Amino acid sequence: MSSNIKVQRICQHCGTEFTAKTTVTQYCGDSCAKQAYKSRVRTQKVEQSNKETQLIRTKPIEELFAKEYLTITETCKLLSVSRWTIWRAIKNEDLPAGKIGRRTLIKHSDLNKLFKQNITPTELNIHDEQRQEQTELTDAGQFDIEDCYSLTEVQNKYGISESALQNLLKRNNIPKIKHGWFAYVPKTLIDKLLQ
């Protein structure tokens, strides 16, 4: 049974107006349908390639997290620091390391311990600005973590940029508490300044 329907449609590939015989026709002709199909396949291949590239990029880091012992090069890659920084930490006995033949190996758990301690800035040759932050961290001992905001929480709550927040903390000598990977600031002092 044939239909006498004639519907004005716009081709979803080339954008020209055409008369369609069904209400679901998307393309003006066979060539536009084929080109649209090729375009969809190409887009899917590009997305698949991008996903594979991302997996390849993140795979080495994930493998480093899984290893129990790391070489100096692997430690540098994991921490995004220079070889000299790692060697300085080993020389200052801040980071335990062992030698097997000519290779120096660092235990992954020792790296975790290093970051759980609040190391002094001279141990890893931190710049002057970071040194000041580190001394503020040690001065913040009278506050509990429960009575503090993380820096991200302050930014979200008061709509302040990271650089503006850092300048505010520096100008007003607000202490920071280092806990794991995060820095915290006392709620009472921040609320008093920003409310």
Image: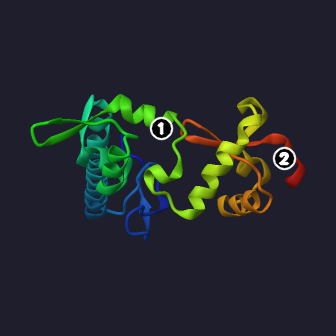
Q: Position of residue 176 (x, y in %)?
A: 69, 46
Q: Position of residue 187 (x, y in %)?
A: 81, 41
Q: Quadrant of residue 183?
A: top right
- Residue identifier under label 1: 115
Q: Amino acid at mark 2?
A: Leu
Q: Is residue 4 visible?
A: no
Closer to the N terminus: mark 1 or mark 2?
Answer: 1
Query: Residue at the location (26% across, 42% down)?
Result: 60
Query: Residue at the location (77% across, 35% down)?
Result: 142
Front-most of residues 56 and 91: 91
Q: Quadrant of residue 39?
A: bottom left
Q: Amino acid at mark 1?
A: Phe
What secondary structure is found at the residue carrying circle 2? helix
Q: Position of residue 149 (x, y in %)?
A: 73, 40
Answer above or below: position of 164 versus 117.
below
- Residue identifier under label 2: 189
Crowdedness of circle 2 by 10 Å Cα count: few (<14), some, many (20+)?
A: some
Front-most of residues 102 and 17: 102
